[in-house]
């Protein structure tokens, strides 16, 4: 299995283990109104599933052990699940710092910085798509200040951890013989299903799929690109017989690649006779593209989430109906796997979006922690009467008869911990 070093680290950290910035010199985070802050927090809350899906894809490309990936997942999940706490800027930073201490023996500094950097990138993409352009400037400055503050704290204290690499199992390649196309197609589907079912991680499932499909369909090269419907961008994530580092350098907007619009409209694999008509000249020259076979992967509600490009190592070829039928069947299997692994939470918790505001969730969490109405009011700088009104609103929205019942609902729905 091919791995790639993480390179997604902000430029001001490149080649350094520590930041020259000291806490007293760190610029104060920008002031935002209560209304603006509530809009940011609510936008992130509503886009939680999209953020998780984008994160899972990016995490699958990291050169990390399973244990390190589990720790990275824990950090990202913590940032996302507790983002509403960021209204208390310093408190949120301190809580996150305590959480990183739990993973210090597992994650190195490079990985921790990458998690924070990717969190900022994913949240910013969400804000760009969900908020108006004038509004997003303030949101970005606030978000960037938050993540930069986290990075300053972590890089001062977090020590570099040792990383271990493990090679994945060697993937058997489908052979060529004289069996009928139908029989060969059925056997290829069965073998792909077996490897997808036994893949322990998303990384294994995707990297195996690219290699298997490329070989099974008789192509020489294959590359898989993730497509974000939020930002209308594509980025390379996996490849077979192509330099993986070069593929992962590809991050472009949909408008710059005419092929994307055409590929995404097709429900079946699409043959492109002349790549130069659909791809920018620098991509055609870099990879020696001529004829291409494309196939789109779909998520829930048939929205495109990725596409696969296949070719004969730059040599022109003509479309083959049997190959296209096989490719259609194999791609549908991988699409099913993606739907399960990326959107499983969306399927199992379709009504999981809490009806509570960030403040009400905070109140419910404090109730679950055993705080009285007076203690809640003192902690949040509210009057006891206002705190009681919040608590009553929580009970009403959750249709709970009392506080223990409201806490039980919150725990069952994973709205509180």
Image (tube, grey):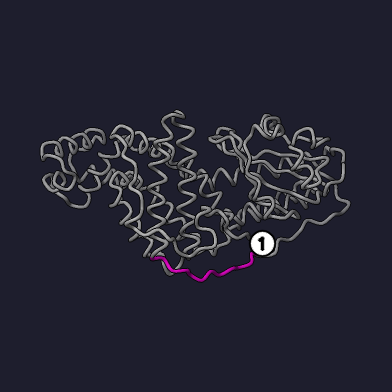
- Residue in the foreground of this view, choosing between 93 and 183: 93
* 5 lies left or right of 125: right
How many numbered callouts? 1
Residue 267 part of the magenta-drawn span: no
* 106 lies left or right of 398: right
How far across and down, in percent of the image, does residue 46 sit? 40, 36
* 173 lies left or right of 152: right
Q: Is residue 413 visible?
A: no
Q: Residue at x 65, y 49 (%)?
A: 249
- Residue in the foreground of this view, choosing between 227 and 151: 151
What secondary structure do most residues of the magenta stretch adopt?
A: loop
How far across and down, in percent of the image, does residue 60 sit? 57, 54
- Residue in the foreground of this view, choosing between 134 and 348: 134
Query: Which residue carries the number 1 mark?
Result: 1
Q: Is residue 3 above or below residue 350?
A: below
Q: Residue at x 35, y 49 (%)?
A: 27
Q: Quadrant of residue 225?
A: top right
Q: Residue at x 53, y 53 (%)?
A: 11
Q: Which residues are magenta?
A: 157-168
């Amino acid at each position: 299995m091919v791995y790639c070093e993480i390179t997604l680290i902000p430029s001001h950290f490149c080649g350094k283990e520590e930041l020259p910035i000291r806490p007293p010199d760190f610029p104060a985070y920008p002031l935002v109104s209560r209304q603006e802050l509530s809009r940011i927090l609510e936008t992130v809350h509503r886009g939680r599933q999209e953020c998780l899906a984008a994160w899972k894809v990016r995490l699958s490309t990291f050169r990390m052990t399973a244990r390190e990936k589990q720790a990275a997942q824990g950090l990202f999940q913590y940032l996302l699940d507790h983002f509403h706490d960021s209204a208390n800027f310093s408190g949120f930073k301190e809580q996150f710092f305590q959480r990183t201490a739990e993973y210090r023996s597992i994650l190195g500094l490079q990985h921790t910085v990458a998690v924070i950097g990717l969190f900022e990138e994913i949240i910013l993409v969400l804000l760009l798509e969900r908020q108006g352009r004038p509004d997003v400037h303030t949101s970005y400055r606030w978000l960037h200040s938050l993540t930069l503050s986290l990075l300053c704290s972590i890089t001062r204290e977090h020590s570099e951890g040792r990383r271990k690499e493990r090679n994945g199992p060697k993937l058997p390649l489908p052979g060529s013989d004289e069996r009928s196309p139908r029989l060969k197609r059925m056997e290829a589907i069965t073998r792909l299903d077996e490897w997808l079912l036994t893949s322990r991680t998303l990384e294994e499932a995707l990297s195996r799929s690219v290699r298997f499909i490329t070989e099974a369909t008789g192509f020489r090269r294959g590359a898989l690109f993730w497509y974000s419907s939020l930002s209308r961008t594509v980025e390379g994530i996996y490849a077979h017989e192509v330099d993986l580092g070069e593929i992962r350098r590809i991050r472009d907007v949909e408008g710059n690649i005419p092929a994307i619009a055409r590929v995404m409209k097709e429900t079946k694999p699409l043959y492109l006779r002349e790549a130069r008509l659909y791809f920018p000249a620098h991509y055609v020259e870099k990879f020696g593209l001529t004829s291409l076979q494309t196939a789109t992967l779909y998520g829930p509600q048939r929205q495109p989430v990725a596409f696969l490009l296949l070719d004969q190592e730059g040599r022109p070829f003509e479309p083959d109906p049997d190959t296209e039928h096989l490719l259609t069947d194999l791609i549908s299997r991988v699409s099913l796997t993606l739907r399960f692994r990326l959107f499983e939470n969306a399927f199992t918790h379709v009504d999981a979006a809490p009806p509570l505001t960030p403040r009400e969730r905070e109140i419910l969490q404090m109730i679950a922690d055993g705080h009285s109405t007076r203690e809640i009011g003192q902690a949040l700088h509210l009057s006891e009467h206002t705190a009681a009104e919040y608590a009553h609103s929580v009970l009403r929205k959750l249709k709970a008869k009392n506080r223990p019942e409201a806490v039980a609902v919150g725990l069952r729905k994973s709205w509180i911990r």
